[in-house]
Image: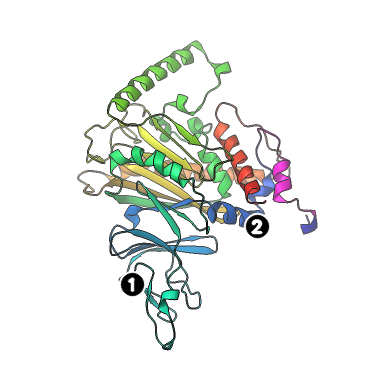
Amino acid sequence: MSEVQLKSLGELIRSRESGCGLPGEVFIRSDIFDTDVDVFFHKHWILVGVTADIPEPGDVSVVDIGKASIILVRDDDENIRAFRNVCRHRGARLKDAGKSTVGKLVCPYHQWTYDLDGSLCHTKHMGKHFDPTCRSLLPVHTKVVGTHVFVCLADEPPADIGKLEATMAPRFAPYDLQNTKIAHEAEIIEDGNWKLVMENNRECYHCEAGHPELTVSFLPEDFGFSTDEMTEESLRALDDYHKRNDASQQGWEKEGLLCSPVEELGGDVATQFRTQRLVIAGCGESQTMDTKVACQKLLGRSSRRDLGDTHMWTHNSWTHVMSDHAMISYIIPLTPEKTLVRTKWLVHADAIEGVDYDVNKLTEVWVATNAQDASLVAINHRGAQDPGYIPGPYSPFTETYVDQFVDWYAARLKAHGV
């Protein structure tokens, strides 16, 4: 196909049949990928880390997002700041991607030196008329919610991050998530477009066959079902599900714990998110193979183990917070066909490995789940490129959030003039 024959992204989206998936081209073309990164990762709020990434003053975490790079740093007053990873001299990268600890930020090219608040504090050979106050590092908009560090690279970030903060702060508060440490972190580079990674995360149609470890702790009714296909046995199971849910939520609400779902998912919102407190199956304690806590030292001050799973979706992340630990994943698109999935498991800051928790028990469910998802995304991505691919209909019972994600994607592109 020649460049002249290529349909625009807008034309491809408009060609989508309602209730069906996107055309395969939107997952492979480099021009569409560049547009996606610019709109969804440079102009929207994205999750790029947790406070435990930079626990002490001078700790630095560098995250590359397309051609952009940001430095997260905890300053001497223990504030979390974010800056463009660009020296104000000739643009050299100050730090490579990853974590480190510094006294000051020093450019490796000409040794321009910056304090942790971003101010330029040392240069050589610039003359007496040089004004260092005009050459501070460029700040990046930052918002910390619970332990989640969100940034926005736009000059004017979407203001509706305030709705996410107002909704999630009280839900995360009982867990004292800033008083945590990273017990384990892992990265997977999935062989698929970032939209397919997020679509896969938005449904559990595939979970029964694809995630044997994860479904141990899930109540399947939480993730959709066809009422047309229900048997007497499944109707009884549904009744039991409602009774368990009602009893759990009444108990949580008596303790002041928020349970009801909140959805900000429509195309009129920029900062998309969804949250709900879900009942955990089995023993009801945690997302582990025996559904009991993996860490004996619980988060926050509660002694109660059965607090369910408080989850949060955004357009580049998913979070599960339980009584004993939190699992937080976020994605960064690398190429049209490669997506980085970075996952962190958080436990109480004072928890001791080998005494309070075992890393294998803590991580085994989501290590397996992430690997399985990577395989599923890869076959989805490959198949969507087949000349014979015609997008099929989403399940109205189990894929409603996928359909909604695609609608939101199209609406946000339109809002940005695409």
| Snapshot quadrant of residue 58 | bottom left
Q: Position of residue 207 (x, y in %)?
A: 49, 33
| Snapshot quadrant of residue 326 | top left
Q: Looking at the image, which residue is at 23% across and 35% down? A: 302
Specify the label residue 319 is tagged with: none
Q: Looking at the image, which residue is at 41% across and 44% down? A: 165
Mark earlier in primary sequence (2, 1): 2
The N terminus: image quadrant: bottom right
**Cα distance between the residues tagged 2 and 1:** 38 Å
Between 199 and 255, which is closer to the camera in this rendering? 255
Name the kind of residue labelled 2 in the image: Ser
Mark 1 Cα shell of 10 Å, populated few (<14), some (14-19), many (≥20): some
Specify the label residue 30 is tagged with: 2
Q: Position of residue 124 (x, y in %)?
A: 40, 86
Q: Looking at the image, which residue is at 43% across and 15% down? A: 239
Residue 16, visible in the rendered structure:
yes
The answer to if 6 sits in the magenta stretch is yes
Highlighted magenta segment, given as a residue range? 5-19
The residue pinned by badge 1 equals 104
In the rendered view, would you say 91 is above or below 22? below
Q: Secondary structure at mark 2?
A: helix
In the rendered view, would you say 140 is above or below 328? below
Between 246 and 81, which is closer to the camera in this rendering? 81
Q: Position of residue 362 (x, y in %)?
A: 32, 42
Q: Position of residue 166 (x, y in %)?
A: 40, 41
